[in-house]
Image (cartoon, rainbow, N blue to C red):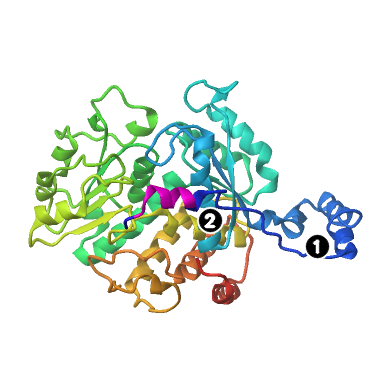
Amino acid sequence: MNISREEILTYHLGGKIGLRTLKQLRDLRSLCIAYTPGVATPVKEISRQPDDVFKYTSKANLVAVVTDGTAILGLGDLGPAASIPVMEGKAILFKAFGDVDGWPVPLDCCRVDGKTTGPTDPERVIDAVCKLAPMYGGINLEDIAAPACFRIEDRLSELLDIPVFHDDQWGTAVITLAAIINYCVLSERDIGELRIVINGAGAAGIRIADTLKVSGAKSIILCDSKGVIRTDRTDLNVTKRKHAVTTTARTVGDAMRGAHVFIGVSVADCIRPEDVRAMASYPAIFAMANPDPEIRPDTVAAAMGDKPYIVATGRSDYPNQINNVLGFPFLFRGALDVRAKTINMDMKLAAAKALAALARQPTVKSGQMHFYPDEELVFGRKYLIPKPFDSRLFLEVSHAVAAAAVTSGVAEPVDLKQYRTELEKRNETRQAP
């Protein structure tokens, strides 16, 4: 799409979110109910029965979108203030796609007196989130640099009894797994036989590797800016070392020779045409760096000629967009609805499987699917995963996540059949993005 800088800045004037009241305040009676003296009644109920906070406040549908601004998009450490447009954008996506109320919470945890004090201090972020958590039903961590993000998410998950989810880690991993599942269907290969190369060993790359291994992948080579993460390297942190392999490959190009799948969560234009040509037959190239991919789809097409392949990016202007918007709104929707205390691996895998299955179903040219009038949305090389505006995501992924939460014992028992019916009704009446 040809979108000008001026159009983008005009759209963002005044911010992108604001307060939407759920109850009317029209007269003296409603004022007395909403505030004093009436508000004392739910206060006492919550004091007497703490779980009633989910019943009498907005907590049950409110997610904090938390960042310290140390890893904003592909732009790096630009600070909490510069992160706000991204956090507001996340809040819009939460509401539009998942009917979840998200609110930006940028934390100034790396600065003292307005001056940068260095990389993320995990303990300061953990402490700040714990203090603000009583208002929220879930915590979505965003744009926090690795390796601090791993410690922050793990510790908050231990300390809090609400879902904590670092989208840059797990959101990307969930959508990538969905695409891999469907690549296996199209290529008639089992995930256990795939030779996979991941370029980028930050939050996304590490968790993609973790998730694929849990799902049965046996051959994964992870690369960072210095090359292949090998067992003989002495510069690896603990997180990278658990994925180190013994191999003669030293560069990402070396690793790609004979590989079935390339997954890029790194930097633009780092993959050459000859690297793609050296891959196995019918390869998958997931070049997901934003805003510019590791190798452009037209470059892949020129390199492959008439040979079959699959290409995906993180962008919405190319086919097969592997983007977190397919995951986090529905992961939280399902988790919040059954009062899950965490978002565990079972729930993440369920989301990925539901996404993959939805892409294999016939598309419905109605409702929000009118956003794609010129595309033939038939499962195949150019339609590997669902489109973000497919309204069925709200139903299928949310229900799959909720069911996994209940089955795995991290949520309250609910009638899942009835819950699906409620989601169907809600999906019919909610406002489309």
Residue at 24% from the left image edge and 35% from the top image edge: 245
Q: Give whichever of 255, 245 is nearer the camera.
A: 255
Residue under pointer 2 = 92
Badge count: 2
Is disc 1 surrounded by few (<14), some (14 to 19) or many (20+) residues within 10 Å? Answer: few
Towards the viewer: 398 or 316? 316
Q: Is residue 288 above or below residue 433?
A: above
Toward the left, the furthest residue is 306
Q: Quadrant of the N terminus?
A: bottom left
Figure check: 103 above or below 67: below
Q: Amino acid at mark 1?
A: Leu
| Residue 182 at x, y percent in the picture | 29, 63
Residue 167 in view (yes/no): yes
| Main SS class of the magenta portion in the image | helix
Q: Is residue 181 magenta?
A: no
Region of the chain picked out in magenta, as a range? 3-10
Q: Is residue 315 left or right of residue 160?
A: left
What kind of residue is marked 2?
Ile
Q: CA distance from mark 1 to mark 2?
A: 25 Å
Q: Which residue is mark 1?
A: 25
Q: Residue at x 48, y 53 (%)?
A: 11
Q: Position of residue 385 (x, y in %)?
A: 33, 64
Q: Are marks 1 and 2 in contact (CB under 8 Å)?
A: no
